[in-house]
Image: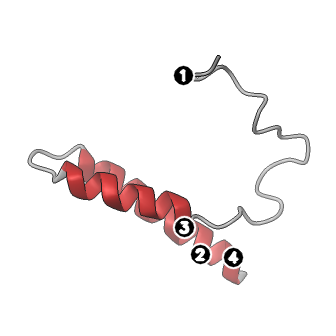
Amino acid sequence: MCPNCEDFARTVLLLGQLALYADTAGADLDFVEAVSTSLAVSLPEPPSGMFSDDCDPDGGPAQPGDI
């Protein structure tokens, strides 16, 4: 596996595990907020070929807060 692929996969896995932790009873949500933000910012560019060339990240459905 290429170095960027490994970093991307590891970070996505950590974000998933953090999301599962956030749903447990008694989870420290301040910790979840701080760590999830840090992990999301550190997420490297996706490895080439992960998304199709015609994938438009701005072309999805409207999200809450969009004008």
* Mark-to-mark CA distance, 4 and 3: 12 Å
Q: Quick one: label 4 or label 3, which is nearer the N terminus?
A: 4
Q: Quadrant of the N terminus?
A: bottom right
Counting residues from the start of the chain, the first of labels 1 and 3 encountered is 3
Residue at 61% from the left image edge and 68% from the top image edge: 8
**Secondary structure under badge 4?**
helix
Which residue is the extreme one toward the front? Answer: 67
Q: Position of residue 20 (x, y in %)?
A: 30, 50
**Residue that badge 3 annotates:** 42
Residue denoted by label 4: 4
First in residue order: circle 2 vs circle 3: 2
Badge number at residue 7: 2
Q: Which amino acid is tagged 1?
A: Gly
Callout 1: SS: loop
Query: Do the CB atoms of the residues marked 1 and 3 lie less than 8 Å apart?
Result: no
Estimate how packed mark 2 is, as few (under 14), some (14 to 19) or many (20 or more) residues with alpha carbons within 10 Å: some
Label 4 Cα neighbours within 10 Å, binned few <14 / some 14-19 / many ≥20: some
Instruction: Kindly report which numbered mark, 2 or 3, lies closer to the viewer in this rendering.
Output: 3
Residue at the image point whose x is 23% and y is 43% from the top: 23
Camera-near label (4 vs 3) is 3
